[in-house]
Amino acid sequence: MGYTNSVRLRGNFDEVVSATIDALDQEGFGVLCDIDVQETFARKLDAEFQRYRILGACNPELAHEGMTEEPELGALLPCNVVVYEMDEEVVVRAVDPEQLVGVADTPALDVIASEVHDRFARVLRTVGQKFESVEA
C-alpha cells in the first residue's frame, strides 16, 4: 500500500514548485519549511543529486484540531510535499495523510486525515492542470 499520491508532469522545475506552493495556499496550507535537497547534499556531502525540494505544509486549523485530539500528532507534522526531477519529468508527491495518521490508531483523526487527503488531491489536480501530465 502506497503512502503518497503524485502527479508526473512536463514542465519547468521552478514553475512547478511555485505552482505547488500556490495550490497549497489555495487549500489553506502554509509552507513552514522549504528544503532544497540538491543544495544541501552538495554543501554537506559534496555530492550531486537531482533537483529535489521538500515542502513542509501545514493547515493551522486542521493541525490544531488534530493536535488537540492527539498531542503526539505533532511528531508527524508538517505534512511533506516533494517536488523532484526524474528523467525529463517533474514529480509532485504528497504524503497520504490517511496512511500517516493510521500509525496513531486514533479514530477521531480519521475525519481530519480524510479532509487533508482531499485537499492534497485538489493540490495535485490543480498543479496537474497547469502543466502537461505524464501517464504512469
Image: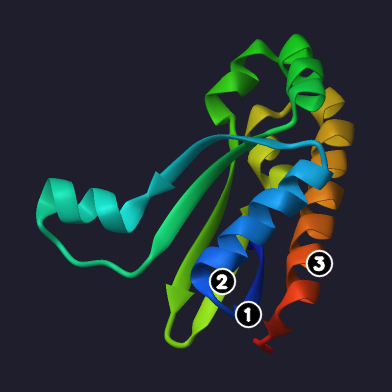
Q: Are marks 2 and 3 in contact (CB under 8 Å)?
A: no
Q: Which residue is mark 1?
A: 9
Mark pair 1, 3: CA separation: 11 Å
Rendered location of residue 26, percent (x, y): 82, 45
Crowding at dot 1, Cα within 10 Å, few <14 / some 14-19 / many 20+, comes out as: many
Crowding at dot 2, Cα within 10 Å, few <14 / some 14-19 / many 20+, comes out as: many
Q: Amino acid at mark 2?
A: Val
Residue at the location (86% across, 43% down)? 114
Mark with earlier residue (1, 2): 1
Q: Amino acid at mark 1?
A: Leu
Image quarter for residue 112? top right
Please tell me the numbered disc located at residue 125.
3
In the picture, the quarter occupied by the N terminus is: bottom right
Q: Are marks 1 and 2 in contact (CB under 8 Å)?
A: yes
Q: Which residue is mark 2?
A: 91
Q: Amino acid at mark 3?
A: Arg
